[in-house]
């Protein structure tokens, strides 16, 4: 997603001041009531990592109805000041992330709300599940519509101290509704960011109609990006340093659907509503 660090820090500050979990959307008619804490930890009891990324250590199957389990996820709220650093057009709420029948739907809607013309959701595992190295698999079906910008990605947990892009960013999957079927993956770090050279994509014609598994294999030497197990990009700088390899530190997972912005582009004026549907998120170590 390539956001600017000052915008992230701004949203973090707002989160702290507003206690984040209270959500500033309390006046919104479509808001959901947060469920009481439930026993839905993502950590797999008794799992012993082998270092070969073949042991399931954390997962969310989204079997708890409503906003995803708060032991695993939190929501980032608002516009992130200047469109989360990417000139995005949506206002993020909790209400637009809802799990039902084992599927999480992150829904982007055309609706005027608090100065924005669209709403959506962005959920994160920050401070709840952060990890170094592993195989990440996310089974998802992507939203339809010009201007939609769904993303499955990760940020370095030290972003609040070192900023972006020094913290590192791993874009597992990004898709532009205006460029249907082209699944892209990218790396952002101090040696390459924004229009990063660390990028590749593959074409899947049916990404908005059927589920695919988007993933990475991440170890101390490289990060490989896959769709349904097929590798389309590997990042493995031969000489690693702080500029090109901040990926020896903990990262957290982010799921969101943005509207417009630097990658999403022009929004179809006929767009009304569409969702990224997520069957599961699984991490192996």
Image (spheres, grey):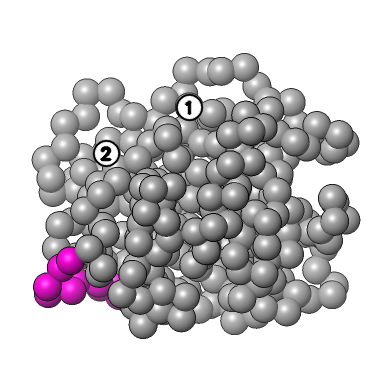
**Residue at screen point 49% across, 67% down:** 2
**Residue at screen point 75% across, 36% down:** 24
Read off the magenta span.
Answer: 231-241
Q: Which residue is mark 1?
A: 71
Q: Is residue 228 above or below residue 68?
A: below
The C terminus: image quadrant: top left
Percent position (x, y) of residue 252? Answer: 40, 46
**Is 232 included in the stretch rendered in magenta?**
yes
| Left or right, 238 with reference to 231 | left
Residue 276 figure quarter: bottom right
Q: Is residue 181 above or below residue 34?
A: below
Percent position (x, y) of residue 153? Answer: 44, 57
Q: Quote the CA–CA distance across marks 2 and 1.
A: 18 Å
Residue 57 figure quarter: top left
Residue 97 visible in this rendered orientation of the protein: no
**Is 147 included in the stretch rendered in magenta?**
no
Label 2 SS: strand
Q: Is residue 179 above or below residue 218?
A: below
Specify which label sits upstream in the sequence, 2 or 1: 2
Query: Badge 1 local density, few (<14 within 10 Å), some, or many (20+)?
Result: some
Label 1 SS: loop
**Residue at screen point 61% across, 38% down:** 15
177, 111: nearer the viewer: 111
Percent position (x, y) of residue 176? Answer: 59, 74
**Residue at screen point 40% across, 64% down:** 165
| Left or right, 87 with reference to 32 | left
Query: Badge 2 local density, few (<14 within 10 Å), some, or many (20+)?
Result: some
Percent position (x, y) of residue 40? Answer: 46, 24
Q: Which residue is mark 2?
A: 56
Residue 52 visible in this rendered orientation of the protein: yes
């Amino acid at each position: 997603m390539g956001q600017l660090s000052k915008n992230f820090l701004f949203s973090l500050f707002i989160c702290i001041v507003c206690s984040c979990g209270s959500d500033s959307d309390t006046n919104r008619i479509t808001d959901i009531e947060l469920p009481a804490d439930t026993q839905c930890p993502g950590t797999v009891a008794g799992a012993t990592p082998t270092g070969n990324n073949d042991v399931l250590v954390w997962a969310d199957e989204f079997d708890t109805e409503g906003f995803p389990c708060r032991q695993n996820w939190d929501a980032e709220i608002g516009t992130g000041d200047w469109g989360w650093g990417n000139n995005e057009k949506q206002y993020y709420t909790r209400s637009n992330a809802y799990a039902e029948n084992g599927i999480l739907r992150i829904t982007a809607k055309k609706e005027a709300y608090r100065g924005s013309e669209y709403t959506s959701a962005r959920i994160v595992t920050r401070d709840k599940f952060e990890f170094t190295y592993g195989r990440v698999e996310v089974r998802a079906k992507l939203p339809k519509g010009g201007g939609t910008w769904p993303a499955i990605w990760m940020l370095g947990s030290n972003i609040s101290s070192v900023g972006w892009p020094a913290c590192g960013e791993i874009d597992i999957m990004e898709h532009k509704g205006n460029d249907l079927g082209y699944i892209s993956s990218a790396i952002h770090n101090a040696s390459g960011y924004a229009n990063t050279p660390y990028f590749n994509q593959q074409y899947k014609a049916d990404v908005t109609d059927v589920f695919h598994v988007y993933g990475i294999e991440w170890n101390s030497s490289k990060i490989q990006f896959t769709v349904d197990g097929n590798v389309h990009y590997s990042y493995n700088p031969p000489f690693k340093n702080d500029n090109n390899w901040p990926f020896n530190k903990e990262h957290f997972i982010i799921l969101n659907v943005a509207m417009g912005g630097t990658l999403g582009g022009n929004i179809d004026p006929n767009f009304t509503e569409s969702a990224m549907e997520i069957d599961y998120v699984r991490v192996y170590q």
